[in-house]
Amino acid sequence: MASTLPLADVKILDLMWAIAGPASTRMLADYGATVVRVESSHRFDATRTVGPFHQGKPGGENSGLFFNMNAGKRMLTLDLAKAESRAVLLDLVRWADVVTEAFSPKAMRAWGLDYESLRAVKPEIVMLSTCLMGQTGPMSQFAGFGNLAAAIVGFTNLAGWPDRPPAGPFGAYTDYIAPWFNASAILAALEYKRRTGQGQHIDLSQAEASLHFLGTALLDNEVNGRPQRRVGNRDLNHAPHGVYPAAGVDRWIAIAVTTDEQWQALCSVMGRADAAHDQRFATRTDRLAHQDELDELVASWTKDLELFQAESALQDRSVPASAVRNLLELGEDPQLLARGHFVELTHPRYGTMAVEGSRFRLSRTPAQVGGTVSTMGRDNQHVLETLLGYSEERITELAAAGVLE
């Protein structure tokens, strides 16, 4: 990793797992931070069991999701259940500027690794604790993933069709929101430390951080007394707005008309001059009042069209529209390819494996994604010998005791 990257002097001990935590330190690793990710073969990261897998074959070293969340990190296996591992971990705390963990609140306390214990080892340490509901409160011990947090804070109730049970947003939704708050909080704490010399403990609740994305719904209820409900793919303010069938099996196109000009352009592309002059659809208010007719009209046009031809025809007339891409098509998307979004890393068994690039670009200090896939225990020797200065004899003793498993 080039020394010119903005976080080249930042050292992070990463005890997190799954998505919300590791995705945060992945952002910092892309910009030069040295991140030592601790894992154990006796209790490995849950995302190793989640696809997509290399060639569709499940396996601990086959998960594209895991590699995506941990690219650019130093991988250390350490069995925290063994007493000998505590000394190694505390040496890593002395080495680090930041310690991150994503366990339920009781876990770090049980290991004697809570913030006060770490401060006793290194007073200026920055510690990030991020779990589903935060470190305090009556639900602090409630452990789970982002799909549960999405249900608790209300995302699930808003996603789906009005006449069906809640469908919820895809996957562990809040796991993909919290990393931005985690990474930003760490950077703010490091800046505070730079100015004052003092560390701090960041208690970040994944559920609370994600509430930010429900701001409109919360205000609508608070100010207008109007609780929002599931509306499928429709919008409260615009029409036509939906996902419409295209030619082929399970092919769809999303269309979102937000102005009268876009509506007129859509009618022109569809060759429906009659609809353009239909008073039922003349204004936004009119269109919202006749959404069933609108959806039927648009779908009757899209259902026989090739997906990407329809997308191009609409985008060429400035009508917001996008083909609903599958994963294969996403990997071939010209916009993502032009920006170099997908990066191939060397895999010791498979040659290469693709991960996503950095989530954002800095013009003067662009990100650099680590060059080798983060396989389990890959950097044990480097971390223990080079970063911690352990002798070969000490490392051998740890290995023989099963600590490095």
Image: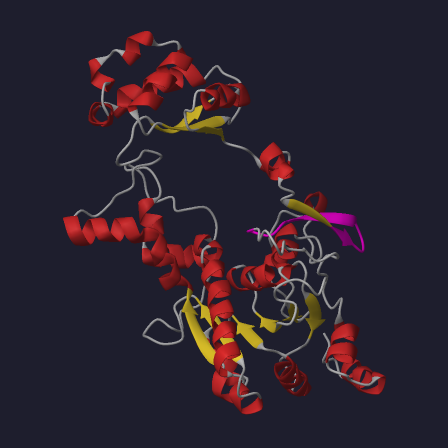
The quadrant holding residue 272 is: top left
Residue 146 drawn at (x, y percent):
45, 57
Relative to 141, 86 lies left or right: right
- Please, is residue 137 above or below residue 233 in the view? below
Q: Is residue 280 above or below residue 341?
A: above
Residue interval drawn in magenta = 345-360
Compared to 402, does 152 lie above or below? above
Q: Quadrant of residue 144?
A: bottom left
- Residue at x-position 20% and y-position 14%: 279
Q: Quadrant of the C terminus?
A: bottom right
Residue 35 appears anywhere in the view:
yes
Using residue 163 as the reference point, say whether residue 86 is left or right of it.
right
- Spot occupied by residue 275 in the image (x, y as percentages of width and height): 29, 12
Name the residue at 42% across, 14% down.
269
Rendered residue at 61%/72% (across/down): 12
Asked whether residue 356 is drawn in magenta, I would say yes
